[in-house]
Image: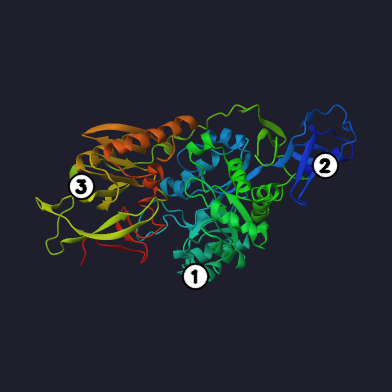
């Protein structure tokens, strides 16, 4: 905090300097006293709250502009403590939807853009978040790629990582998969040592870690986790001093179960509400953290507790001294609510400036101009049909097949496929078709295999929008359509393409890092809905295709995955042969 700002704030209270504006006639939601306080006046200067004092019926600050709250509840701006905004849409496209949803601060992972475009891409992404009425902080990616022995991508060196972590806008280390952390890898422990020396946080990913494994994970310095799916898991983490982030978003909705924490005698200051990402459909049709807080209230949390889990709790967790509350020396991020239970937002103030009112943003959001390098990140050569054919091994007729269990989990099954012309042949009757992952910079770095459970019978889909590595993923009922889809994705520098009968029937361009569309949020929403309509025409049985496609190659969840290096057994953390020995 600059001494000049402190002096200005003091001068306001002393009556030497006028405030920039004064807010009157509101009901202040005090997250420190758990009280709703009336007849108060809020003086704002240089984006900060200078004073909160008793309202004597008129402003003591002369001609300073007065904002009449008209009886609204005045609530601190919401903070999304864990999300992933480095894919699908640009930051500037997010801003008006975040602000409309009462979200004035976000803390985001950057692992996917790190894998896709390296440190230069990270720098461009960070730069793209500046200058907007939405405060953005980051957590440094702990491992790029997550499992280098099983997959490849750009790598953020330890030196580059250290420079990121030492920045003021980096609050800690992003989610480190416990499977790697428990191995005591030197780099991960060195990163943890640096974070702790800087008094920064170490966000966790403890899915499946219980008992002794969770204790070991805590010993690596982990301070939070957003992966609890039931109350027992959440309480176990709280018992070990790990903050619990309740996820309610695109990937999973945990509030129906974790809202039961309200009935337990636990320290609710160590519980936060997070999105873990909202997709464009949700942003356009549900809102943002306003929807999450509203849902928490619906499941039984008091409005005060729900609000605190999205304001002061994440602010305190990350050491954001000037956020999370309506109090002196805090940023003037204020939501004007018609009522608390419905979290009905009428106006939004950010940094002391009104940015949303009457159902619309009050500031023009200018698109960020990305450098040319950010839109040319896919250099892989084009593929031929033959690249997706696999030679049979007469000595090993049984093969491993990826079996899709649900939206996020796969498992290994084994099958014997027929052979034609020396190559393994798909079996549409058993829903077994070819699958491949191609390194986005080298098409010769390619993993081939077979997958069951997609339902695809007459076409293919290719995409670069996959978790973590952002390589090129393709599945299809025939090699011709697979090659056509892959090559078109390369042409448009990232995105998603569906082909059928040798024709392109769907195309969604994401040229920024091969991960983000340059279009507005509503256009992206419409393209996602179109994807959900088009995919069934080639036979898919996915119930949530926009999510299913992103997770199939994801090595952070069990059990059998495919990467650009081949088939990966997540339990053993080793590559395995397609052919069963």
- Pointers 1 and 3 in contact (C-beta within 8 Å): no
How far across and down, in percent of the image, does residue 260 sit?
59, 57
Q: CA distance from mark 1 to mark 3?
A: 41 Å
User: How many neighbours does mark 3 have within 10 angstroms: few (below 14), some (14-19), or many (20 or more)?
Assistant: some
Which SS class for mark 3?
A: helix
Q: Is residue 204 left or right of residue 553?
A: right
Q: Is residue 489 visible?
A: no
Location of residue 289 with respect to 400 vertically, above or below: above
Q: Find residue 377 and report its image quarter.
A: top left
The residue closer to the viewer here, 153 or 98, is 98
How far across and down, in percent of the image, does residue 401 sit?
26, 57
Location of residue 245 with respect to 56 vertically, above or below: below
Q: Is residue 251 left or right of residue 482?
A: right
Kindly identify which residue carries mark 3: 428
Q: CA distance from mark 2 to mark 3?
A: 69 Å
| Mark with earlier residue (1, 3) | 1
Kindly identify which residue carries mark 1: 213
Q: Quadrant of the C terminus?
A: bottom left
């Amino acid at each position: 905090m600059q001494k000049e700002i402190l002096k200005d704030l003091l001068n306001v209270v002393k009556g030497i300097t006028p405030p920039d504006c004064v807010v009157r006639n509101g009901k202040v939601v005090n997250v420190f006293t758990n009280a709703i306080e009336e007849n108060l006046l809020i003086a704002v200067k240089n984006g900060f709250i200078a004073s909160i004092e008793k309202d004597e019926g008129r402003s003591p600050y002369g001609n300073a502009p007065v904002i009449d709250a008209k009886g609204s509840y005045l609530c601190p701006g919401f903070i999304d403590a864990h999300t992933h905004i480095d894919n699908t849409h640009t930051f500037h496209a997010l801003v008006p939807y975040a602000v409309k949803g009462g979200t004035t601060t976000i803390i985001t992972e950057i692992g996917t853009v790190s894998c896709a475009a390296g440190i230069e891409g990270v720098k461009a992404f960070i730069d793209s978040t500046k200058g907007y009425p939405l405060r953005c902080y980051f957590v440094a990616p702990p491992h790029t790629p997550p499992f280098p022995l099983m997959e490849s991508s750009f790598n953020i060196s330890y030196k580059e990582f250290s420079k990121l972590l030492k920045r003021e806008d980096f609050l800690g280390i992003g989610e480190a998969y416990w499977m790697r952390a428990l191995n005591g890898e030197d780099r991960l422990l060195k990163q943890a040592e640096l974070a702790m020396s800087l008094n920064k946080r170490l966000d966790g990913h403890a899915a499946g870690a219980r008992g002794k494994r969770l204790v070991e994970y805590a010993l690596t310095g982990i301070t939070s986790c957003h992966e609890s799916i039931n109350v027992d898991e959440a309480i176990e983490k709280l018992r070990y001093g790990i903050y619990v982030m309740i996820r309610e978003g695109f990937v999973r909705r945990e509030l129906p179960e974790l809202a039961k924490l309200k009935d337990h005698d636990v320290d609710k200051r160590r519980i936060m509400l997070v999105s873990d990402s909202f997709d464009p459909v949700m942003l356009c049709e549900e809102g943002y953290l306003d929807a999450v807080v509203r849902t928490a209230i619906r499941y039984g949390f008091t409005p005060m507790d729900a609000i605190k889990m999205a304001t002061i709790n994440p602010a305190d967790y990350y050491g954001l001294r000037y956020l999370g509350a309506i109090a002196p020396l805090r940023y003037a991020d204020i939501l004007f609510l018609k009522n608390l239970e419905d979290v009905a937002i009428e106006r939004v103030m950010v940094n002391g400036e009104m940015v949303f009112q009457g159902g619309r943003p009050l500031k023009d959001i200018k698109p960020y101009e990305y450098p040319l390098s950010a839109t040319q990140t896919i250099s892989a050569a084009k593929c031929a049909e033959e690249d997706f054919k696999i030679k049979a091994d007469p000595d090993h007729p049984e093969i491993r097949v990826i079996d899709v269990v649900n939206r996020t989990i796969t498992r290994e099954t084994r099958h014997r496929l027929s052979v034609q012309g020396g190559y393994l042949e798909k079996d549409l009757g058993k829903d077994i078709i070819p699958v491949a992952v191609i390194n986005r910079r080298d098409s010769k770095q390619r993993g081939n295999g077979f997958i069951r459970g997609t339902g695809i019978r007459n076409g293919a889909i290719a995409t670069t929008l996959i978790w973590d590595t952002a390589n090129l993923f393709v599945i299809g009922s025939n090699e011709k359509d697979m090659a056509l889809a892959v090559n078109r994705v390369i042409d448009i520098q990232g995105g998603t393409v569906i082909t059928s009968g040798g024709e392109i029937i769907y195309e969604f361009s994401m040229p920024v890092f091969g991960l983000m569309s340059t279009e507005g949020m509503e256009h992206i929403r419409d393209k996602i809905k179109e994807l959900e309509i088009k995919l069934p025409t080639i036979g898919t049985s996915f119930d949530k295709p926009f999510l299913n496609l992103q997770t199939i190659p994801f090595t952070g969840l069990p059990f059998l995955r495919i990467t650009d290096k081949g088939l990966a057994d997540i339990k053993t953390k080793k590559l395995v042969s397609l052919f069963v020995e």
